[in-house]
Image: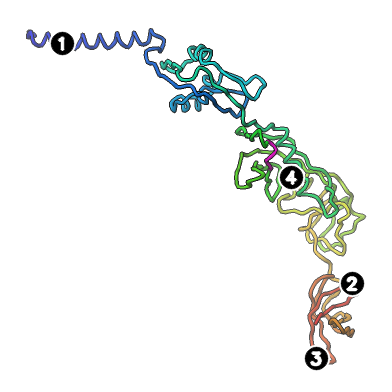
Amino acid sequence: MIKATQRYGIMAVFLIAAAAFAAVSAFGAGGGAAIERQATLKSSAETRSQEVCLGDLVEDAWLKGRCAVDHKACCRWSMEGVLSREFKRVELQREIDRFDLGGIAVKITGADAVAVTQTKRELRAAEIQARILDALTAKIKNSNGSVDGSIAVTSLKVPVPIYVPLNNENNWTVAIPETLAERISAKILSASDPTATLGWANATLSRKIPIYVSKVTVRPSDKIRIEDFELKSAEIFAGVSAGANTEAATYFMKDRFPEGVRARVTVRAGTALAAGMVERSPIVQLGDVVTLVLRSDSMKISTKGVAQGPAAVGDMVTVQLQRYSRAFRGKLLEGRQVEVWF
């Protein structure tokens, strides 16, 4: 048999549990309005866009944190096309009462109204793209100030909104990588303080230039002749017909065809001619007679000598003067001349 004291203990536990269940049920039936939280309305506030969020309007750390992660619930007002606008506390409260803040009822106290001013604006993708294109154009200009072929920004993504102050909204610039590729990340900086990063933008580029493409197959050691090549516009970031490594290859563009070179490797028909595919052709060989020109600021002496190895124009080569048992090392010029300066 259960003793009387035991029966009373069991009944007490049951009553406590029932009371707790009733309290929880009452809280749920109240639609989350059982807990009230007061927040003080500011007399003035700033926003960085036309969108206005509750966290910007009140002095309450909890609401600021909640609005930072619950943008949809907290950002329900608009500046409606103006830079300054007043929001009345009564009207704000009416909207706040419809918020779902997980059982928290927010009551606004403080000022009767808050004057909100927009101080920043979000940069548009189109203007960021235009600045990136300007930076790219400046980077690839040749010595004549023009651009070989064309370059374009085909797509742009800004992962996080970038804001600039309205009182100096053009005070920003972009920095692009030293080495260009099909996809780059551009840094958005403050023009007055280049150490201040405002954000990042990811761009996809297209670069087309006229380059020399082989019409025939050229074998190693064959002379590279311009008549064996034709100019074609090619997308260099996507690679060209032979699948060359565009990061390592430097293509010969219009008016820059290499002279006095031979093929270092096989250049197949349809392949773009790159610097790594050619080497200079020696115009003198070991034992060839050359003209040695000895120069100083006030003297010039020319004599004959014998080359001590093969060399192309621009190479350094040693020349032996047999009559004097003396050797000089100089630069090979056109006309089989070797120049030595003192």
- Magenta-drawn segment: 169-173
Q: Earlier in the sequence, mark 3 or mark 1?
A: 1
Q: Nearer the viewer, mark 1 or mark 2?
A: 1
Reading the image, the residue beneath label 4 is 135
Q: Is residue 21 magenta?
A: no
Q: Quadrant of residue 286?
A: bottom right
Residue 160 image offset from top left, x and y in percent: 60, 33
Q: Nearer the viewer, mark 4 or mark 3?
A: 4
Question: What's the distance in space between the residues labelled 3 and 2, CA to CA?
Answer: 26 Å
Q: Earlier in the sequence, mark 1 or mark 2?
A: 1
Q: Nearer the viewer, mark 2 or mark 4?
A: 4
Q: What's the mark number on residue 334?
A: 2
Mark 2, residues whose alpha carbon is within 10 Å: few (<14), some, or many (≥20)?
A: few
Up the image or down, 274 lies above or below 316; here it is above
Disc 3 marks a residue whose amino acid type is Ser
Q: What's the mark number on residue 58?
A: none
Residue 111 image offset from top left, x and y in percent: 49, 20
Which one is nearer the viewer's eye here, 35 or 235? 35
Reading the image, the residue beneath label 3 is 325
Question: What's the distance in space between the residues labelled 2 and 4, CA to CA?
Answer: 40 Å
Reading the image, the residue beneath label 1 is 10
Mark 4, residues whose alpha carbon is within 10 Å: few (<14), some, or many (≥20)?
A: some
Disc 2 marks a residue whose amino acid type is Glu
Question: What's the distance in space between the residues labelled 3 and 1, CA to CA?
Answer: 122 Å
